[in-house]
Image: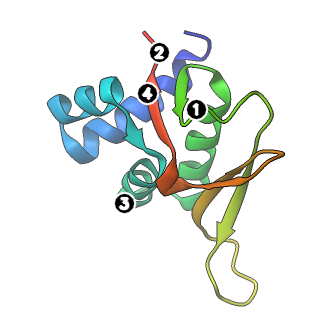
Amino acid sequence: MKDPAAVAAIVSILRRVHGDDIARALLADGVRLAALIDAAFSLPISNSDAVRMIARALESGDFRFTPDIGPLWHVRYIYENRRASMRVVDMEMLTPDRAFASTDISLRLLV
């Protein structure tokens, strides 16, 4: 693993929300980025900590993205639709060719 701490954070999020067996299945078969975001935001941690954990995992290189988005991408944060809000509610992945919504992307742990 390239970033064991980032992987451990994602595993912990999934285990706390879904339990061990489902977390293993999600990591092996693929978990939608949207489901991971929802799970992280449901935990009693700050929004910024949840966002950092997910972003670090995405950048770690320890997960395979489906569809293959290629080597050049950037995460765009979607903020709550409230004046001056800094609360992230979703993420998109931008490539030179298109934007992928969190519901379009699955992450699978490389083993």
Packing grade of label 1 (10 A; few <14, some 14-19, many >=20) is many
| Above or below, comparing residue 19 to residue 86 in the picture | above
Report the quarter where the N terminus lies.
Answer: top right
Q: Are marks 1 and 3 in contact (CB under 8 Å)?
A: no
Q: Secondary structure at mark 2?
A: loop
Q: Are marks 4 and 2 in contact (CB under 8 Å)?
A: yes
Q: Which residue is mark 1?
A: 57
Q: Earlier in the sequence, mark 2 or mark 3?
A: 3
Q: Earlier in the sequence, mark 4 or mark 3?
A: 3
Q: Nearer the viewer, mark 2 or mark 3?
A: 2
Q: Secondary structure at mark 1?
A: helix
Q: Distance from label 1 to label 2 (Cα)?
A: 12 Å
Q: Secondary structure at mark 4?
A: strand
Q: Nearer the viewer, mark 1 or mark 3?
A: 1
Q: Which residue is mark 3?
A: 42
Q: How far from the left and from the top, in percent, is residue 63?
A: 53, 24
Q: Distance from label 4 to label 1 (Cα)?
A: 11 Å
Q: Earlier in the sequence, mark 4 or mark 1?
A: 1
Packing grade of label 3 (10 A; few <14, some 14-19, many >=20) is some
Q: Distance from label 1 to label 3 (Cα)?
A: 18 Å
Q: Nearer the viewer, mark 4 or mark 3?
A: 4
Q: Distance from label 2 to label 3 (Cα)?
A: 25 Å
Q: Residue at x 56, y 40 (%)?
A: 53
Q: Which residue is mark 2?
A: 110
Q: Is residue 81 left or right of residue 33?
A: right
Report the quarter where the C terminus lies.
Answer: top left
Q: Residue at x 44, y 59 (%)?
A: 41
| Above or below, comparing residue 96 to residue 28 in the picture | below
